[in-house]
Image (cartoon, rainbow, N blue to C red):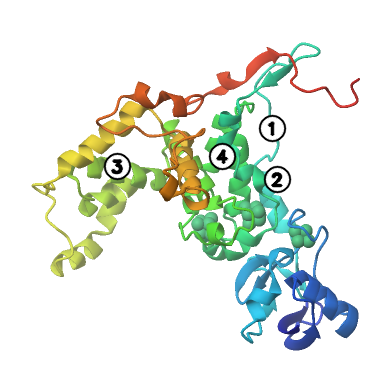
Amino acid sequence: MDVGLKIWRFNRETGDRELREYEIDAPEEATLLDCLDIVKDKHDGSLAYRKSCRMMICGSCGMRMDGGAVLACKTRIYDVVKDGHVPTISAMGNLPIIKDLVVDMAPFWAKFRAVDPYLRPGYQEPPHGKEHLISPQRMNVIHKEALCINCGCCVSECNAMESDPRFLGPQALAKAMRFVGDPRDGHKIDRLETLNDEHGIWECTRCYFCNERCPKGVDPRDAIAKLGAESMKEGIERDMGAKHAKWFVHSAKTTGWLRETELVPKTQGVVSAIKQTKFALGLLKHGKVPPPFPPHVAEGVGESRRLYDLVQDQGVRGYDAIVQGERALAKLEHMHDEDNGRDPFAEGTLRPYLPDEKPEEIGGANEGMGSLTQADVTPGEEPTRKPEGGA
Ligand code: SF4
Ligand code: SF4
Ligand code: FES
């Protein structure tokens, strides 16, 4: 198979940057990484890129193809070039380039370290020969986050990092959620406090590019949403982002509308709102601001209030509320089979109950899910497997 590649070459020492074109012969099953190997082995030994496992595990081969981050060893080149397309390959974004497709990962690892990416246990060591057990359902909360291979594809595409290089970014925040949601960790509140500081969770612009580009299905934006929801559940609401979200809920519950006129004072405070009076008057002049009094109450506000009450009744808050939808959506996407009537809420997925249902009627599917706490770490059970090196 003939494959054409355009590769952005860069030399940090000289500052030279050049788009070079290569024509190679590659087998049909080749990945982008295989093609780069062919270029390096047979055409141009000076090409620099990173690789190690060649099987989507080590996270070394992140780069951009046609402007979007990919793992080179996951990208089958046949699908890209079969219609004569010549892809452009370049280094990942948001990280300084060292040479060609190799970026300096030091800023990436600095942010990774900043979130304490290790378990800080909140339990006593079990008695000798025993171990703590956690239900698989409880670990589902961080199942996706634990899949991260630190490839940096999400960071490459993050537009919040582009405008603020100090923003912690999607990879570090997904890793933070991996420990915030781990019932064995004893520092959830400290962690959430730090993540609510400047350059933390509320700086995300919700562009979802990280979800779109993550090659492992970690969905970092969803992890950030879980951290936000859990912060609010724990009463950590000092950031404007949290106040903004809270006002959205209050406004929808009370009138069924988003009352934008009150959004600025409720989110930024009265002083800041006064500073923006001129801007507000401009909007008013152009008919963009409805009068705040009396507040306009939507005809169907009862429905909005019932939805609010339902969520309160179910008591599923914080990251549990997001996980609830996450697993059902994944099942719909990957295995739901309408013809055979398979239920996306069955088999270990927490199912929300509807107004005409009783929670106990659907209890089977919800067993072991929902608002679980650190008490889910069952102390001192007999080990379920032999310790390594054991007889
Ligand atoms: S959703 Fe947030 S974290 Fe993800 S890429 Fe966009 S700004 Fe960055
Ligand atoms: S979240 Fe996904 S894209 Fe980001 S570093 Fe982890 S595996 Fe890579
Ligand atoms: S070479 Fe390891 S993930 Fe691609």
Q: Is residue 296 above or below residue 303?
A: below
Do tag 3 and tag 2 residues touch (Cβ < 8 Å)?
no
Question: Is the C-beta of the residue carrying label 3 under 8 Å from the nearest atom of ligand 1?
Answer: no
Residue topped by disc 2:
113
Residue 164 in percent (x, y) is at: 55, 61
Q: Name the mark nearer the viewer: 3 or 2.
A: 3
- Quadrant (top left, top right, bottom left, bottom right) of the C terminus: top right
Q: Earlier in the sequence, mark 4 or mark 2?
A: 2
Q: Residue at x 77, y 54 (%)?
A: 58
Q: Residue at x 13, y 51 (%)?
A: 292
* CA distance separating discs 3 and 1: 34 Å
Q: Is residue 223 above or below residue 92?
A: above
Relative to 311, 105 lies left or right: right
Q: Amino acid at mark 1?
A: Leu
Residue topped by disc 3:
249
Q: Quadrant of ligand 3?
A: bottom right
Q: Name the mark nearer the viewer: 3 or 4.
A: 3
Q: Earlier in the sequence, mark 3 or mark 2?
A: 2
